[in-house]
Image (spheres, rainbow, N blue to C red):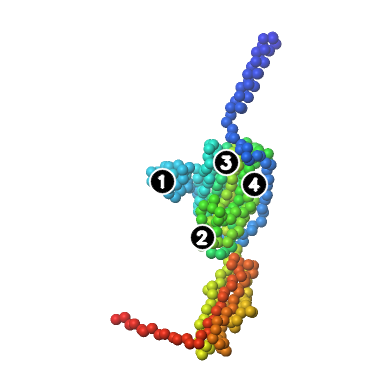
Amino acid sequence: MCRSTAVSLSILSALFVLTATVALLLRPRPVVLASTPQQPLTLTVGDEEVCTGTNLLANPSFEGSYPVYVMPAPGHPDCQTWFDDQPNQYCERVKLADDWHPYWLNTPRTEGWMNIQPEYVPSLPHEQPPRVRSGEKSQHYFSFWSTHEGGLMQQVSALENGRYCFSSWGHAWSARETLSGWLSDPNDHGQLYQRVGIDPTGGTDWQSPTVVWGEMRMQYDEFGLFSVEAVAQADTITVFLWSKAHIPVKHNDVYWDDATLTLQHAASVTPGELTALLDVDLPTAVTHTVAISITPGLTWAAALDPSGTLPASLSQTNGTTSTDLHLTVNSSGLPAGTYATTLTVTTTPAAPGSPFALPVTLYVVPDLHETFLPVVIRP
């Protein structure tokens, strides 16, 4: 090879390397937040069901046709507008399982990759590694070269003061580049966390301080169980599936399947207090009815305060089912005055509100006059 040819090849090689280097440098790449340094992948797998009983959720396995989601008016600025009568309501990027509703954070968004609206789609059984735990589909949503915080929710009728257990199987796929086997990258991922929550007041604001959240963790490439318990404070509660990607890598994908909501324990004792008024000259016995309601698996025990001044008796002192308890007081031999005791009903295991304390009061008066109102007959 002549010297001029060798020099020409060297120049061409150098130009090729320089061009490739410039192209690599000019390739758009997302910015990694300095405030969220990369951490090694962690994986915690829950493998046992924790919520037992009748599942109260609609479509807990995320099946169905996944239609395009239409937001209630006035909609959301991230949603597309296809129809004049649906301003910002037609969310083309949100294809959601029936009976579930989406939510996401949209601020701050000072960069194009920050807090974007996740794209919601069904996941199918043929995907690898398995992205469907049971049935034909699971709920999948993702942010591509971007971060997100959001998920989906469902409102459910509830028994006030009932203890509820909510769980769902979930996992994520998070990696800067697409690896062999479509697996998460243990050294370069989006710090994608998941958790579940319950709002015991039935609200739909996932950022409300009333939401009770379960454990938050990274759960990559394998389904693990997320769960939480809370006591209902209204006749409706709301369950939330949540995730947050901190770093804008290529794959920040979330999968949820097989959600469960069950009523664990609930009990009620009514009325809240008992009162009687009797004439000292007409001693008599009065029986009150106390309604005890418990969910299956609970037992109850009733007792009167031994230090109380009111003599009383109970028709029974314990039980394993809901029942009407009868409490009887007798004014025989009692001089005029006020007599009191407390009826305490305790459940095992302890249900919200247990033990229930009912004040019982008897007023014995010297003269009790009965007044009869005239009868009015309509013409």
Mark closer to the chain start, 3 or 1: 1
Q: 58 or 229, which lies in front?
A: 229
Residue at left offset 56%, top offset 75%:
359
Q: Quadrant of the C terminus?
A: bottom left
Q: How crowded is mark 1: few (under 14 residues within 10 Å), some or many (20 or more)?
A: some
Q: Measure the C-alpha gap from mark 1 to mark 4.
A: 37 Å
Q: 175 or 303, which lies in front?
A: 303
Q: Write down the residue under mark 4.
A: 218
Asked if residue 250 is positioned above or below residue 379 in the image, the reply reads above
Mark closer to the chain start, 2 or 4: 4
Residue 247: give x, y in percent of width and height: 61, 40
Q: Measure the C-alpha gap from mark 2 to mark 3.
A: 32 Å
In front: label 3 or label 1: 3
Q: Give amino acid for label 3.
A: Thr
Q: Write down the residue under mark 3.
A: 147
**Residue 86: assigned label:** 1
Q: Using residue 305 as the reference point, say whether residue 57 is left or right of it.
A: left
Q: In which quarter of the image is residue 53?
A: bottom right
Residue 90: give x, y in percent of width and height: 45, 45
Q: Give amino acid for label 4.
A: Met
**Residue 155: assigned label:** none
Q: Measure the C-alpha gap from mark 2 to mark 1.
A: 28 Å
Q: Quadrant of residue 24?
A: top right
Q: What element carries label 3?
A: loop
Residue 295: give x, y in percent of width and height: 58, 68
Q: How many marks?
A: 4
Q: Give amino acid for label 1.
A: Gln
Q: Is mark 1 on a helix, strand or loop?
A: loop
Q: Write down the residue under mark 2.
A: 236
